[in-house]
Image (tube, helix red, strand yellow):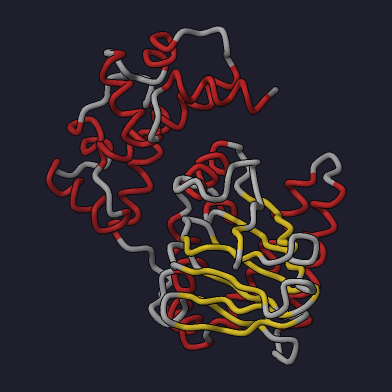
């Protein structure tokens, strides 16, 4: 009988919110990339249960073999293989021989590549791969033409994380960007060709990028939909349509989520500020409303979140 393997954040792997919590911690860490050891050798009779997450996962098989099931497909990955799973794809992993399987997994939120709001770069280099109906996963075997290049940068990332010297985040991001170039090319030459032809950023994306810059600059103030739409010189309804078509959220939802994320950063930096002071500092005039919105996005209250931060620091 298989057991579930516990691989990150010292959180019980049978916690139904495990992967959601991991995503939140990665985003709020300021560097949303993490390296995990999945060791079936020392923890026999294990498997990783069905789950999905917002991050890209890149698995490198160092020893043994395993079966990865993505949605309805089951793929055998062997020593040396590199296997990428795109965001929000349901998957689980079982070892072929639980006494001889060791893998390294890189977990990375897409925003780690270019940062938040880089719509042109996302459209050209990220979305064709992670949002393509053709690629829920990508197997880069040792026989693949691009393997040498991808493997080289992947090994660099592993080495960088093993040392974690000063500035390791910069080096890891640099190596990941170089690796992504080859992943992108390998994914589908036809997709790459299509997006090379589209050099003009759509009007929607131009408007949303400008609106996002406005929100980031003024989120601490009282902002209305009128203010956001006026910043890009369109009507309120057209502003909402631009956001919906580009980000699949409303301008108000984006503003609220950004304020909440900023408030979590403030909790870490200013532990002595009260919840009401933090709420006011990020643009909420009503603490009760701030608590309600925080709960919606973070699945816990501000007080509970602050307590978890203190425990994590200890």
**Residue 131 x, y percent position in the rendering:** 41, 70
Q: Nearer the viewer, residue 300 or 212?
A: 300
Asked whether 242 or 200 is in front, the reply is: 242
Q: Residue at x 37, y 13 (%)?
A: 280
Where, by quadrant of the figure, is residue 83 drawn?
A: bottom right
As drawn, is 149 to the left or to the right of 291? right
Q: Residue at x 42, y 12 (%)?
A: 275
Vertical comparison of 280 with 226: above or below: above
Q: Quadrant of residue 79?
A: bottom right
Q: Is residue 194 above or below residue 3?
A: below
* Residue 275 left/right relative to 26: left
Looking at the rendering, in which quadrant would you find the N terminus? Answer: bottom right
Q: Nearer the viewer, residue 93 or 251?
A: 93
Residue for point 19% across, 47% down? 240
User: Total number of numbered labels?
Assistant: 0
Instruction: Give the quadrant of the C terminus.
Output: top right
Q: Position of residue 208 (x, y in %)?
A: 32, 48
Point out the residue furthest to the front here.
1
In-front residue for pair 231/96: 96
Above or below: residue 266 compared with residue 126: above
Q: Residue 296: x, y in percent?
A: 31, 34
129 relative to 268 in the view: left or right:
left
Return the x and y of residue 28 as percentages of the image width and height.
55, 36
Identify whether 18 is placed above or below 230.
below
């Amino acid at each position: 009988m298989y057991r579930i393997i516990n691989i990150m954040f010292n959180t019980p792997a049978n916690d139904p919110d495990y992967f959601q919590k991991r995503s939140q911690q990665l985003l709020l860490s300021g560097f949303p990339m993490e390296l995990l050891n999945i060791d079936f050798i020392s923890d026999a009779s294990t498997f990783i249960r069905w789950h999905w997450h917002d991050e890209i996962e890149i698995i490198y098989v160092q020893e043994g073999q395993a079966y990865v099931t993505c949605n309805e497909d089951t793929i055998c990955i062997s020593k040396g293989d590199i296997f990428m799973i795109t965001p929000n794809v349901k998957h689980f992993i079982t070892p072929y021989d639980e006494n001889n399987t060791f893998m390294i997994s890189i977990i990375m939120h897409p925003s780690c590549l270019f940062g938040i709001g880089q719509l042109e770069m996302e459209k050209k280099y990220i979305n064709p791969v992670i949002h393509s109906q053709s690629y829920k996963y990508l197997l880069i075997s040792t026989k693949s033409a691009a393997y040498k290049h991808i493997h080289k940068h992947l090994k660099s990332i592993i080495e960088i994380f093993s040392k974690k010297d000063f500035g390791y985040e910069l080096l890891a991001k640099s190596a990941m960007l170089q690796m992504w170039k080859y992943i992108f090319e390998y994914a589908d030459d036809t997709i790459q060709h299509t997006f090379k032809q589209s050099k003009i950023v759509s009007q929607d994306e131009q408007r949303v990028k400008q609106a996002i810059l406005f929100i980031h600059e003024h989120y601490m103030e009282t902002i209305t939909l009128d203010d956001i739409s006026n910043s890009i010189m369109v009507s309120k309804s057209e502003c909402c349509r631009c956001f919906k078509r580009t980000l699949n959220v409303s301008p108000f939802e984006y503003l609220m989520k950004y304020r909440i994320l900023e408030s979590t950063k403030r909790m870490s930096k200013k532990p002595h500020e009260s919840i009401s002071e933090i709420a006011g500092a990020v643009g909420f005039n009503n603490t009760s409303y701030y608590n309600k919105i925080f709960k919606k996005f973070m699945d816990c209250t501000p007080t509970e979140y602050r307590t978890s931060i203190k425990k994590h620091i200890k």
